[in-house]
Image (spheres, helix red, strand yellow):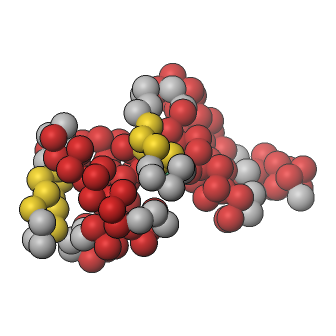
Amino acid sequence: MPQKKQRSALGSSTTVEDYLERILELINVKGYARVVDIAAALKISQASVTNMVQRLDGEGLLKYEKYRGLVLTTAGETLARNIARRHELLTDFLTLLGLDDRVIYHDVEGMEHHISPSTLHAIAALTAQLRRRPALRAELARAVV
Ligand code: MN
């Protein structure tokens, strides 16, 4: 999926997908997502988050009301679920390779934004094969260490 990037005032770039992914995660865990929570999760300023949240509201991906918090629209939730699904699938795949959890999280956070549907599909098929082959998984785990 093509990637929209936004440069924050701090110079780091945080993607629309990162926002939607964190917002869905916060809503799932806490039942709501506030600007302060999103800022903490993404480690960026509340001012940057407010700007982005207003932009996402303008693009119809969420509804934002100052002091009330925000909700994802159907379009926003669809995008967020899609990125969450890519995150889960890539995590499953790298876990089956026997990699370290921190390495997995770091790599998945990058890969999930760049991977094309056809590659993801191939990895899903490979993941399913690996699940059925414990001997091959053990062999891979030895090679990874
Ligand atoms: Mn992710």
**Depth check: 70 or 83 in front?**
70
Q: In this figure, what is the number of numbered marks?
A: 0
Quarter of the N terminus within the rendering: top left
Q: Residue at x 34, y 73 (%)?
A: 37
In the image, taking residue 51 as reference, residue 18 lies left or right, namely right
- At a point 37% along the width and 43% down the height, the residue shown is 16
Residue at x-position 24% and y-position 70%: 34
Q: Nearer the viewer, residue 140 or 26?
A: 26
Left or right: 70 as drawn, with respect to 113? left
Q: Is residue 77 left or right of residue 8?
A: left
Residue 126 image position (x, y, % from top left): 62, 36
Front residue of 114 and 118: 114
**Front residue of this view, candidates 139 and 34:** 34
Q: Quadrant of the C terminus?
A: bottom right
Of all residues, the one furthest to the bottom in this rendering is 30
Above or below: residue 77 compared with residue 25: above
* Residue 89 at least partly seen: no
User: Whole-percent x and y of residue 81?
Assistant: 31, 48
Q: Looking at the picture, how far across and down is residue 22, in whole percent? A: 37, 60
**Residue at screen point 36% across, 57% down:** 48
